[in-house]
Amino acid sequence: MDPSASVTQVTWTEPATWYANLASFYTAAAAFITDPAGNVLLVKPTYRDHWAFPGGYVDEGEYPHDACSREIREELGMSVAVSDLLVVDWAPSVGQRPRAIVSFMFDCGSIANVDGFDLPGEELEDAAFFSPQEAEQHLPGNVAPRVRAAMTARGLHAPLYLAGGSVVPPSSIDAAEHEAGPRSQTA
């Protein structure tokens, strides 16, 4: 080896320092619930101008599917079976939100109507079923694509990955991996 060549020195980083310097993000969990006709359940928070899927943020130490179940109990006053993961959407930081949000959407089946809901009045003012097109119109633009993605994933029995509300086809993930080379097995 040429003594004048630069040698990269690898140093050990203390775990606390290592983890403190990793990127962090928020995590949310939502329920995809339809009625027997395929209409999508949305809730209207009192603190927002738009509608949302039932759900909310994942608490520290809580699994996303457990957060989904908890949020349904808190928001609708009922228990539902949290089933398959339908959508994972990486929403980059925007505006006043300094971190990305990883949103998990789970299949929570079908409910005939909203008659049995016990909405917390301080948090939610309404819950209703909308056609998929109407649901997309009631949701923010970056969230609306989750309606079609969830419907597609439910039919495929396989989750879909979205990046900023856009479906990332598996073929593009494979192509990017191929271009970048093999992944490290240590991550």
Image (cartoon, grey):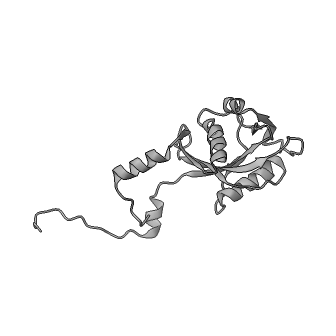
Q: Is residue 185 above or below residue 98?
A: below
Between 157 and 24, the residue placed more toward the observer is: 157
Residue 184 location, quadrant:
bottom left
Query: Would you say residue 164 is visible in this rendering?
Result: no
Q: At x 67% / y 47%, what residue is drawn?
A: 154
x and y percent of residue 82 in the render? 73, 55
Residue 61 location, quadrant:
bottom right
x and y percent of residue 77 in the render? 84, 50
- Please identify the quadrant where the C terminus is shown: bottom left
Q: Is residue 124 above or below residue 157?
A: above
x and y percent of residue 22 in the render? 46, 58
Q: At x 50% / y 44%, what residue is drawn?
A: 169
Q: How many marks?
A: 0
Taking the image as shown, residue 62 lies to the left or right of residue 44, namely left
Taking the image as shown, residue 101 lies to the left or right of residue 82, namely left
Taking the image as shown, residue 179 lies to the left or right of residue 47, namely left
